[in-house]
Amino acid sequence: MISVKNLTKRYNSSQGDIEAISGINLKVAAGEIFGIIGPSGAGKSTLIRTLNLLEKPTKGEIIIDNTELTSLSAALLRKERQKIAMIFQHFNLLSSRTVRGNVSFPLEIAGIAKKERKQRVKRLIELVGLSDRADHYPAQLSGGQKQRVGIARALANDPQVLLSDEATSSLDPESTKSILKLLSRIRDELNLTIILITHEMEVIKEVCDRVAVIEAGKIIEEGTVLEIFSKPKKPLTKKFIKSVIDFELPPRVAEYLSDSQHKPGILLRVSFLGENTHQPLISYLVKKFDIDANILYGNIDEIQRVPFGTLVIDLEGKKEKLSASIQFLQEQGLQVEVLEGESIT
Amino acid sequence: MNQLLNFLFRYNQLILEGLQETMYMVGLSLLFAVLLGVPLGVITTITREDNIFPNKAINNLLNGVINIGRSIPFIILLVAVIPFTRMIVGTSIGTTAAVVPLALAAIPFMGRIVDNALLEIDQGVIESAEAMGATPWQIVYKVLLPEALPAIILGITLTAISLVSYSAMAGAVGGGGLGDIAIRYGYQRFKLGIMIETIIILVVVVQLIQWAGNKLANSFDHRN
């Protein structure tokens, strides 16, 4: 659906040229929600704004639905842009128009006849659940409601692609959740391809299928959200993941461990992904190897309906049993890390 | 009491005529100021670098026109354009003739006000229209003008009030109006009463224009 080749944007400034993005390559399939995450200044905003040529790239190709955008004339580009919708962090609604008027705006641009426009506007406002606010002005709406108007407006001309430029970054957590839900619902209903940029890993975890991590204008890591969460490679990626899934032991557990009263055993961190969570692994471990297991800390989350989590367990028992337990856990496809204890493995 | 009223209204007819002349001059020149000043301001804004229709040459030209127009003192403009006035109106004397210099002074004034009003619009709103595939012309009449409408209405109000003040000088070319009466009767013939009366009327007129302008601007303002 979307293919980006060697995309580069260079700005001339008094301190010399600055490359906001350099040599970006991306492929996004139809119906996919693709997230781009990066710290501020990494170039993610430039990247998404280049995709519909709000920023002219210095070099590179952007192919959306088999059309190469950078070589289009101004008139053809405008036509193409009607199929590439965009939503914004600050909503960018017309303050002089009501909800209805704002949703009608892109249809007027596309030259849709008045009668059909009215029907479509009504349907779109219903789709985003704002029928009772249709005659309100943006200033009378909450942030979440404004973004709903932004989404209805974006969908007006039946786009194939939706670009989301930090669309939830100025919303409270509750509105963020409901907007993300709406995005994934319209993706399912309309088979929309969505590219979103964000600096919040929560957003990626919540709705994205695949994710790219961008740092200093380059994509440093890319994969399905599950892959990235379970096996992050780059420090920046790990840092982002840490913001939503805490791998650190809470102080309470750390204190308990440093306590001299604490009997020597081994302390394991077990990470699991997917199916395994349905099996009673720990109780099986205890029975089979005749050891004691004490769960000190646990964290289970879901990424795209796949359970994903970490357990910190304290095992006590005979040495050979302990090492056999570790081996058993590894055989089950779990990632095991020995945090404390004699060198057993 | 009757005597007082009689005294006050001795010059009624004269003042009424003056008021009509003032209204005529201000109204007509304001009309031209809006008709030509709004496009002037719009084109100046959109031809700016990084706006929707960048064109350095046009932008420099229009900026120059606005700045020069705004820097000529009105009393000088009034006499300087006499040949031009004669060309358009056929005469350089009278109320209609005074409209030409008034309009010429008000057009660049209005142009700058519109330019400033349009620059106040959130860049993101314009960008979102561009992202939807709007043409520059669609952006002008569907985004820029409606979004800036309250500010433009206040600008028109400001221009109207400036024109009331400028029109007082129109007496220099036989334009008449309240200001002219104040000078000829009140100042040159020492009739202080007339002077005060015309000033009171002018104050009331200005108040009314400002009140109506505010009211209208508010009714179009949905920003909060």
Image: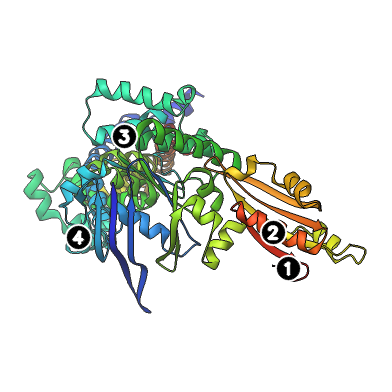
Separation of marks 2 and 1 at Cα, in angstroms: 9 Å
Q: Nearer the viewer, residue A43 or A89?
A: A43
Q: Do discs 1 and 3 belong to a common subunit?
A: yes
Q: Do discs 4 and 3 belong to a common subunit?
A: no
Give the chain letter at badge 2: A
From the image, state whether disc 4 or disc 1 is nearer to you.
1
Q: What element carries label 1?
A: loop
Which mark is first along the chain, 3 or 2? 3
Residue at image mark 4: B55
Residue A9: give x, y in percent of width and height. Answer: 31, 66
From the image, state whether disc 2 or disc 3 is nearer to you.
2
Which amino acid is tagged 2?
Ile
Residue at image mark 2: A326
For image coordinates 75% across by 52% down, the residue present is A297
Question: Is residue A129 toward the left or the right of residue A61 in the image?
Answer: right
From the image, state whether disc 2 or disc 4 is nearer to you.
2
Residue A105 is labelled as: 3
Residue A213: give x, y in percent of width and height. Answer: 46, 60
Separation of marks 4 and 1 at Cα, in angstroms: 75 Å
Q: Is residue A246 visible?
A: no
Which amino acid is tagged 3?
Phe
Q: What element carries label 4?
A: loop
Separation of marks 2 and 4 at Cα, in angstroms: 71 Å
Which amino acid is tagged 4?
Asn
Q: In terms of image quadrants, where is residue B47?
A: bottom left
Residue at image mark 1: A344
From the image, state whether disc 1 or disc 3 is nearer to you.
1
Give the chain letter at badge 3: A
